[in-house]
Image (spheres, rainbow, N blue to C red):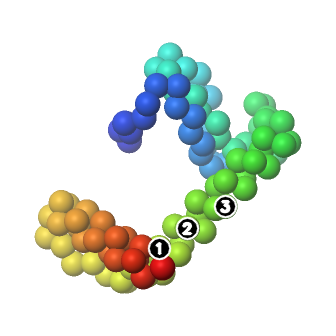
Amino acid sequence: MYQFDLPEEALFTGDKAYNDYTLEDMMPDANLNPLPLRKNNSHRTLPYWFAYLLSYCRKVIEATGSLIERLLPKHIHAVTARGFELKVALFVLAASFNSR
């Protein structure tokens, strides 16, 4: 299970593979509001305009991620997890200077 530091009443989305209704029903008790994209045959569909908006925002995020991924090296050699995180953060920082 991932641990995220989200503010209360946070809205977050997931992809179409997300389909755990039990977990989704428990999240409002923790002041979290999941808004996953739904498959067409889902029992809990979203309005079409809202699904379009989520899809559009997700495409922007995925495009940005792929642009950053192109600038990163194919392999990152690191001995510790902290060293790996530091190298990735520095590569992303360098990529932000490169894009201007």
Q: In the rendered view, tell whether residue 43 sits above or below residue 95.
A: above
Mark 3 surroundings: few (<14), some (14-19) or many (≥20) residues within 10 A = few
Gap between marks 1 and 3 measured at Cα: 14 Å
**Residue 96 location in percent, x, y?**
42, 73
Residue depicted at x 34% and y 70%: 93
* Residue type (three-letter) at the residue carrying disc 2: Thr
Q: What is the quadrant of residue 33 in the picture?
A: top right
CB-based contact (under 8 Å), mark 3 and mark 2:
no
* Residue type (three-letter) at the residue carrying disc 3: Lys
Q: In the rendered view, tell whether residue 39 sits above or below residue 33.
A: below
Q: What is the quadrant of residue 47 in the picture?
A: top right
What label does residue 19 carry, if any?
A: none
- Residue for badge 3: 59
- Residue for badge 2: 64
Residue depicted at x 79% and y 35%: 45
Q: For the N terminus, which image quadrant?
A: top left
CB-based contact (under 8 Å), mark 2 and mark 1:
yes
Residue depicted at x 57% and y 34%: 11
Q: What is the quadrant of residue 51 in the picture?
A: top right
Upstream in sequence: badge 1 or badge 3: 3
- Residue for badge 1: 68
